[in-house]
């Protein structure tokens, strides 16, 4: 038995993967290294990366400048506790984030993952109202098809079906859900689109601390892209009914939709915002929850006068340096032009998919291309087809999607697109 088939056997026996089973016979590929937009497997196969490791590796892998910044930080320290101690990487990154995000956001709470950033956001909202002695404002309103993470608070505001509310029904907090908007990105938001949300707010606002939404693009809940006008109306209604607005920009942040943050499509600002994923350019796990001066002040002056959260690895210096280094790279790159180019190419390139019977819809925004099928994909069958085509694309449920690193060249992007067209043409054929 070769070394790498033994490794894969061990993996299958004892290592859990995301949403996976132990001992399953689903295809698994052993990665040796990654550089630029190429993922190199142990058997020598090279794959063009269509996933950016789930929205994060926006500059591609193994970037020399980022590597240098990180190894230099290693010489100083890789980690130090954040209680009572602080450091330049955290201060620099917090300041950079405040500059980059909507201007009302003035404070930064660092956490170690997106889900935890959502937990912190929910706790901030509830603590805010507690401090103002609105003790009944403890619930959250959200829309269906959302995804906010895998921890209990985050699950409670994710789509009831995708979030598997039934499985965890005894533990899961019951929140309020409105229908997802049906108005697409370029469509106006009609009264019929917003009525469900409005009704929930009218009926329950005395108990609602905050609304949480993914702005413009709903990610893992189905890759739906909705109208900025809907988001504008949500903002107005939140103001009107005295409810905070949390925007989860964990997937959409840092340029992915063509704007630095997706809320800019609607020219609105949240009261609390979560960022993660692309924050460190895919190098290390780091996320953050930002809020306004006012909310920070109310929490800090209220009872008990502290924000009740503090992860062990909060503001890890290596991760903060990766964040700083990634943001510098992004800001000095022509990222808007690059994403515009990717958007145009995806729109024109993926359209032919609509001609194939298994395809229900094609949608594109920024550097995100989505092909929705009528039936869920058989991942065991479809995954090897993509690998044979020399690309790394990882579909879920009925969705085949790509969100390549921003630095991808036209030829590689074309290969990604062609592989999708080929795969939808193959799965359409009768056996
Ligand atoms: C991925 C994601 C999360 C969860 O982030 P993790 O780092 O996986 O915990 C939360 N919200 C959105 C919108 C996401 O895409």
Image: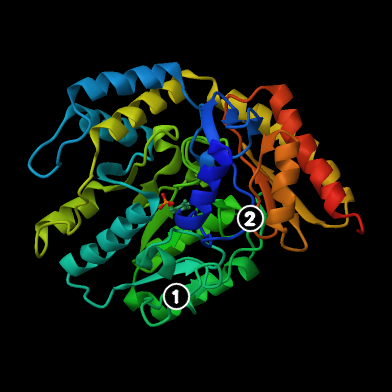
What kind of element bears circle 1? strand
Q: Is residue 426 left or right of residue 204?
A: right
Between residue 138 and residue 317, name the one nearer to us: 317
Q: Is residue 370 left or right of residue 121?
A: right
Residue 304 appears in the rendering: yes
Q: Which residue is mark 2?
A: 26
User: In which quadrant is the C terminus drawn?
Assistant: bottom right
Q: Is residue 75 left or right of residue 57?
A: left
Task: Establish if 308 lies above or below 5.
Answer: below
Q: Quadrant of residue 338?
A: top right
Q: Is residue 128 left or right of residue 342?
A: left
Chosen colour scheme:
rainbow
Residue under the image location 53 percent in, 62 percent down: 21
What kind of element bears circle 2? loop
Q: Which residue is mark 1?
A: 176
Relative image position of residue 259 (x, y in whole percent): 53, 36
Relative image position of residue 262 (x, y in whole percent): 51, 44
Q: Quadrant of residue 169?
A: bottom left
Task: Establish if 347 lies above or below 12.
Answer: above
Relative image position of residue 379 (x, y in whole percent): 68, 55
* Mark 2–mark 1 distance (CA, rounded to whole Å): 36 Å
Relative image position of residue 76 (x, y in whole percent): 18, 22
Decide: marks 2, 1 in contact (CB < 8 A)?
Answer: no
Task: Establish if 405 lies above or below 265.
Answer: above
Q: Quadrant of residue 305?
A: bottom left
- Which disc is residue 386 wearing? none
Q: Residues within 10 Å of mark 1 (few under 14, many from 20)?
A: many
Residue 210 appears in the rendering: no
Report the number of numbered marks: 2
Between residue 116 and residue 259, name the one nearer to us: 116
User: In which quadrant is the N terminus drawn?
Assistant: top right
């Amino acid at each position: 038995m070769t070394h790498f088939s033994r490794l894969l056997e061990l993996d299958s026996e004892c290592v859990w993967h995301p949403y996976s089973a132990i001992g399953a016979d689903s295809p698994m590929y052993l990665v040796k290294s990654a550089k630029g937009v190429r993922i190199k497997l142990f058997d020598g196969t090279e794959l063009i990366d269509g996933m950016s490791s789930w929205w994060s590796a926006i500059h591609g892998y193994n970037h020399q400048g980022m590597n240098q910044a990180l190894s230099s930080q290693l010489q100083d320290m890789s980690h130090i506790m954040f209680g009572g101690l602080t450091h330049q990487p955290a201060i620099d990154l917090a300041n950079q984030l405040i500059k980059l995000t909507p201007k009302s956001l003035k404070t930064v709470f660092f956490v170690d993952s997106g889900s935890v950033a959502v937990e912190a956001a929910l706790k901030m909202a509830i603590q805010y109202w507690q401090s103002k002695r609105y003790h009944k404002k403890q619930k959250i309103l959200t829309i269906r098809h959302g995804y906010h993470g895998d921890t209990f608070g985050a699950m409670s505001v994710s789509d009831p079906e995708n979030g598997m509310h039934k499985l965890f029904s005894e533990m899961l907090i019951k929140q309020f859900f409105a229908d997802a908007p049906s108005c697409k990105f370029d469509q106006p938001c009609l009264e019929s689109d917003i009525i469900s949300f409005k009704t929930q707010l009218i009926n329950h606002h005395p108990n609602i601390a905050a609304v949480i939404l993914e702005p413009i693009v709903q990610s893992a809940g189905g890759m739906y892209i909705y109208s900025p006008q809907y988001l504008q109306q949500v903002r107005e209604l939140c103001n009107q009914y005295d409810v905070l607005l949390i925007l989860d920009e964990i997937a959409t942040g840092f340029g992915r939709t063509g704007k630095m943050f997706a809320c800019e499509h609607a020219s609105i600002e949240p009261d609390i915002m979560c960022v993660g994923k692309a924050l460190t350019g895919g190098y290390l796990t780091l996320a953050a929850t930002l809020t306004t001066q006012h909310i920070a002040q109310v929490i800090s002056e209220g009872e008990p006068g502290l924000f009740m959260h503090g992860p062990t690895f909060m503001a890890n210096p290596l991760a903060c340096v990766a964040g700083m280094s990634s943001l510098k790279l992004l800001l000095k790159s022509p990222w808007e032009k690059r994403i515009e180019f990717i958007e145009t190419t995806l729109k024109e390139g993926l359209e032919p998919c609509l001609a194939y019977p298994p395809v229900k819809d094609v949608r594109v925004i920024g550097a995100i291309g989505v092909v929705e099928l009528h039936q869920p994909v058989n991942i065991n069958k479809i995954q090897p087809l993509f690998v044979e085509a020399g690309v790394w694309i990882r579909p879920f449920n009925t969705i085949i999607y790509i969100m390549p690193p921003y630095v991808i060249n036209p030829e590689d992007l074309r290969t990604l697109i062609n592989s999708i067209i080929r795969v939808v043409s193959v799965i359409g054929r009768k056996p």
